[in-house]
Image: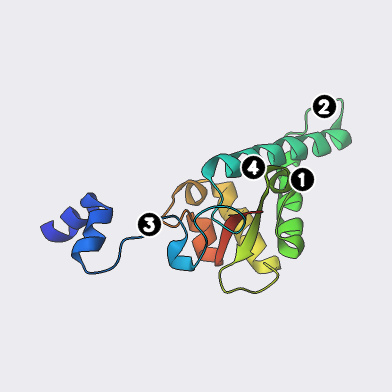
Amino acid sequence: MGRVLGSWLSGPSALRESGEPQQRWRGERLGLPEQGSGSVAPTGRRAVGFLLDIVLAALVAGLFTAPDLPGNWSLLSWALITVLPVAFFGFTPGMAVAGIWVARVDGSSLVGLPRALLRCVLTAVLVPAVLWNTDGRSWHDRLSGTVVLRR
């Protein structure tokens, strides 16, 4: 058990000792380019896209609840802004502004409703959305078979 914990704590160097090649950039194991269009989206762009979607959701919900604050109605608005566009177009309005999009790892053209819904639910939980692997994919991406890429 000590060896397993030690290799876990040592991080990427443990991969080298095990004989597996170490990844040189995020997304290399997925066959993605290191930079430019089609590379894994940086964390900053993802955060900007997410924040823009939250603000848009609050504004849309506020249109229906004014003069009162939107409260939980903004969550429903955010879910609609997130699920439907990602399912059919691969991006939310905030992602479009940030220059990123969601793609399936298996190469299919549409993310689809089940995967987009799973990503949305897991993002709402937040913890899966902030835990990343060496490919730059969070739990909600890995569980839904998706990756967020640069445009």
State which tag comes first along the sequence, 3 or 4. 3
Measured in 3D between alpha carbons, the distance from the residue under mark 2 to the one under mark 1, in whole angstroms, is 16 Å
Measured in 3D between alpha carbons, the distance from the residue under mark 4 to the one under mark 1, in whole angstroms, is 13 Å
What is the crowding at mark 4: few (fewer than 14 residues within 10 Å), some, or many (at least 20)?
A: many
Task: Give me the residue at 49% from left, 62% from top.
Answer: 142
State which tag comes first along the sequence, 1 or 3. 3
Q: Secondary structure at mark 4?
A: helix
Q: Picture coordinates of residue 82 (x, y %)? A: 71, 52
Q: Which mark is residue 24?
A: 3
Task: Give me the residue at 70% from left, 38% from top.
Answer: 52
Locate the C terminus by quadrant.
bottom right
Q: Picture coordinates of residue 47 (x, y %)? A: 59, 40
Task: Give me the residue at 52% from left, 49% from top.
Answer: 129
The residue type indicated by label 4 comes to Phe
Measured in 3D between alpha carbons, the distance from the residue under mark 3 to the one under mark 4, in whole angstroms, is 27 Å
Q: Which mark is residue 68?
A: 2
Residue 47 or residue 19, whichever sits in front: 19
